[in-house]
Image (tube, grey):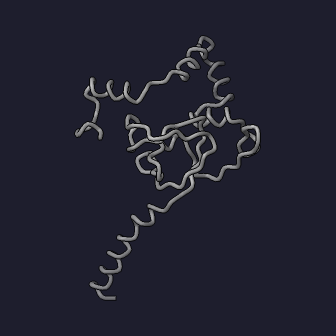
Amino acid sequence: MSKRTRAAVLLALAALLPAAAAVAATITVLVHETKIRRRPQFYAPAVATARLGQTFSAQGPRDGWYRTAAGYIHASAVTAKKVRLSAGGAVAGDASADEITLAGKGFNEQVESSYAGKHPGANFAAVDAMERRTVSDGALRRFLETGGLLPDGGGK
């Protein structure tokens, strides 16, 4: 094969790599609820809310975000693995919806028990209270603007 032909073949293969990476996958939401964002940024405006068990056709993840037709979902809230939901909030027949939510956060009963054993003064009621707190998108944006934390262009 000539150098010119080999270069043309390599160029064609290189052009196909981004297309292969953009193949759509089915993702399933593993947390109680998560926001779908306009852009792949936590402070971007929310365009919708996705709930436990919902599935989406998505591309990615890229920089920790999946792109769906509705917007962007952070990879920490979903899985691209096949998930079987059954009645009563059970996932894959063995885990409850609460356990899946904790697992999505990297926490489960065993981890909590182990941590509590090592840290008997840990205040889990305070952690639960913090998890229940919410901040509106507008309040978050004002905080980021006031602190000069938005990227160039204002994060639009």
- Relative to 21, say whether 150 is above or below: above
Percent position (x, y) of residue 32?
Answer: 60, 35
Q: Residue furthest top?
A: 121
Q: Look at 35% across and 76% down and name the residue there.
A: 12
Residue 93 horizontal side relative to residue 40, left or right = right
Percent position (x, y) of residue 27?
Answer: 56, 51
Percent position (x, y) of residue 105?
Answer: 56, 33
Q: Look at 63% across and 13% down and name the residue there.
A: 120
Q: Nearer the viewer, residue 6 or 102?
A: 102
Q: Look at 27% across and 24% down and name the residue there.
A: 147
- Relative to 75, say whether 123 is above or below: above
Q: Quadrant of the C terminus?
A: top left
Residue 148 horizontal side relative to residue 96, left or right = left
Percent position (x, y) of residue 89?
Answer: 72, 38
Q: Quadrant of the N terminus?
A: bottom left
Q: Nearer the viewer, residue 92 or 37?
A: 37
